[in-house]
Amino acid sequence: MAASANMARNTEPETVEDPDGRARFDELIAADQRVEPTDWMPEAYRKTLVRQVSQHAHSEIIGMQPEGNWITRAPSLKRKAILMAKVQDEAGHGLYLYSAAQTLGTPRDKMTEDLISGKAKYSSIFNYPTPTWADMGSIGWLVDGAAICNQVPLCRASYGPYARAMVRICKEESFHQRQGFEILLHLSRGTKEQHAMAQESVNRWYAPALMMFGPPDADSPNSAQSMAWNIKRFSNDELRQRFVDMIVPQSEVLGLTLPDPDIKWNEERGHYDFGELDWDEFYEVLKGRGPANAIRLERRRTAHEEGAWVREAAAAYAERRRQQSEKAQAA
Amino acid sequence: MSDQSFRISAGEALTAEKITEAGEKPSEAVATYAVRLGDDALILAQRLGWWIARAPELEEDVALGNIALDQLGHARSFLSYAALAWGKTEDDLAYFRDEPEFTNLQIVEQPNGDFAATIARQFIVSYYQFELYRRLVDSTNATLAAIAAKAVKEVDYHRDHATQWVLRLALGTEESRRRMIAGLGVMWPYVDEMFRDDDLVESLGDAAVLPSSLREDFDAVTGAVLAEAELEVPEGFVARGGGREGIHTEFFGPLIAEMQVLARAHPEATW
C-alpha cells in the first residue's frame, strides 16, 4: 500500500489485496519485526492503528486543557515553568502522533475534523476537571503513571512510526510522572491545608486513572486482534494490576491513602488485590456524559474555528511566495 | 543587518537557581533595574501562557508556549538576582507585591486580543528586548551581562517568529491584513514608553542600558519589516505610560490577581 500518495488528499487510501504483500506482512508479524509505511498491510490493521494512534494524539491535545487551566495560577515561578513545559510537551506528543498516523494515509485535517465533530474518541480521563492545584500532582503521578504503564509496551508495537514516536514520548512522560509525584510529596509534607488538598485530589483521580486501562479483559472486544498483530502486548487487566502494584508503595512514600478499602497485599498472587471499579461511570463518561466532555470539545472547536483566518492567511502567503519565486525563476 | 552577527554564545548560562546559590547581592539600584526587566518578561509570559491550548495551530501552541517559557526563564533570573538585595526570593517578588510595585512596561500587560494583536505585541517587545539585551551583554554588572547573554539568543528567535507572522498576516488575506493593522494600532501607542530614560537608568552608568539609545535601531529594524509587509508605522495617540513608576492600565489588576491568587491563599506554604 502506498500510503504516502494519499497524504496530500483529504481521503483515506484503499487497500488492494496483494498476496505477496500479505505473505510478507505475516512474516514480519511472526518474526516480531516492524511494519513500515511502505509495506503492504491489511486494511483492518491499518484502520486499527489509525484509530489507536489518532485517539492517542487527540488525548494529548485535549489533555493540554486540564493542566493548562493552572498555568496562569501556578503558585511558584518554578512550578509555572515546569507546568508550561509539560503542557508544551503534550502538544509536541500530539504532533508526533498525528505524523505517525499520517504515515498510514490519514490526513491530519481529517483527524482534526473527527475530533472537533465529536466522532473521534480520546482518553476519558481528560473529561474530569482540575479544580485544585493538587490536581497537577495527581495528573502527573496517576494519569501519566497509568499512561506510562500503557505506553512502554507500545515502544515495541509492530508499526514502526508509532513505536518510534512512543520511545520519545515515554521518556518525557516518565519525567512528567516524577514531577507529579514531587508536587504531591511537597503538598503532603506541607501545611495542613496543602496535605488535605493533596489527599482530596488523589481521592478523585484514583478510580478514573485505573479505568484508563480500559474495560476488564472479558469486555474488551478489540484486544485479542491487537495482541495478535503485536500492537498490544499485555491485556488491560494485566496492565491495571501492574499499575496498582506500582502506586500502592508510592502512596505510602507520599503519606497519602488510596480511596479503596480493599487494597491488600496478596502473598499468594504476589500482587495487590483491589476493589471493583464502577464501570457504569466509565461508560457514562465514554458516552460523553462526563463532567467536562462538552467543555473540552467546545474549547478545542473554538480554538480551531477562531484560528481559521490565521491558517488561511498562512496558506495565502505561502502561495504568494511560491508565485513570486516562480516569476523570479522565469525572469 | 545580518541576524547571524548578533548571535552571542551563552556559554555557561546562568539559571535562577545558580544566581540564588551564588548569593551575590546587587546594589538596590541594580536590583530595581533588574526588577523592571524581570517584570516585563514575567507579565509577558503570563499573557502568552493563556494561549497554550488555544492557538490557531498546534505548531503555534508549541511556539507561543516556547516563547512564554523563555520569557519566564528570563524573568526568574532577573527577579532571583534582584531579590537578593532585599533578602527575598523570586516568588516573594512575583506573588507578594501589589500592583503599584510592579514596574513592567505597559505594553506587556495589554490583553492578548486576537492572534494578530498578540503578534503585534510580540513583534514590538521582541525587537525592543533584542536591542536591549544585545547591549546589556556588555554591562559592567557581570550577572546582568550573563542573563542578557542567554536571553538575547532566545529573543532573537522570538523576533524571527513575530516577523514571519507579521508578514504572513499582513500579506495573507484581506481579513488577516485588516486584523494585523488593527493589532498594531492597539499596541503601537505603548511603544513610546519603552524608550524613556529616567534617573535610575542614568545613575547606573554602564551597568544598565539607556532606553533612549535603543530607539534608532528599533525604528530601523521594525521599519524595514513593516515596509516589507506593506504596512505603515502607526501614528497618532501615544499612551501616557508610567509602567516604570508602577502606573498600570486597567488590564493589570485582574492579571496579577489571577497570577497571585493561590500563592496568597497560602502565604505560609512552599510549593
Image (tube, helix red, strand yellow):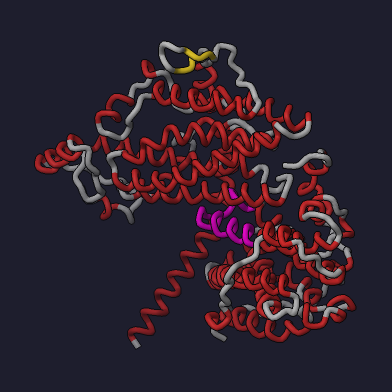
Q: Quadrant of residue A257?
A: top right
Q: Is residue B15 above or below residue A97?
A: below
**Magenta region:** B51-70
Q: Is residue B166 visible?
A: no
Q: Is residue A287 above or below residue A130?
A: above
Residue B56 included in the magenta stretch of the image: yes
Q: Is residue A234 above or below residue B169?
A: above
Residue, far left? A20
The residue positioned 87% from the left and 80% from the top of the image is: B203
**Nearest to the observer: residue B66 or residue A62:** B66
The residue positioned 69% from the left and 70% from the top of the image is: B125
Q: Is residue A156 left or right of residue B99?
A: left
Coordinates of residue A222 in the picture (x, y in percent) = 33, 26
The residue positioned 24% from the left and 37% from the top of the image is: A43
The residue positioned 56% from the left and 74% from the top of the image is: B9
Coordinates of residue B259 in the picture (x, y in percent) = 76, 49
Coordinates of residue B232 in the picture (x, y in percent) = 66, 80
Q: Quadrant of residue B138?
A: bottom right
Q: Is residue B186 left or right of residue B224?
A: right
Residue A290 included in the magenta stretch of the image: no
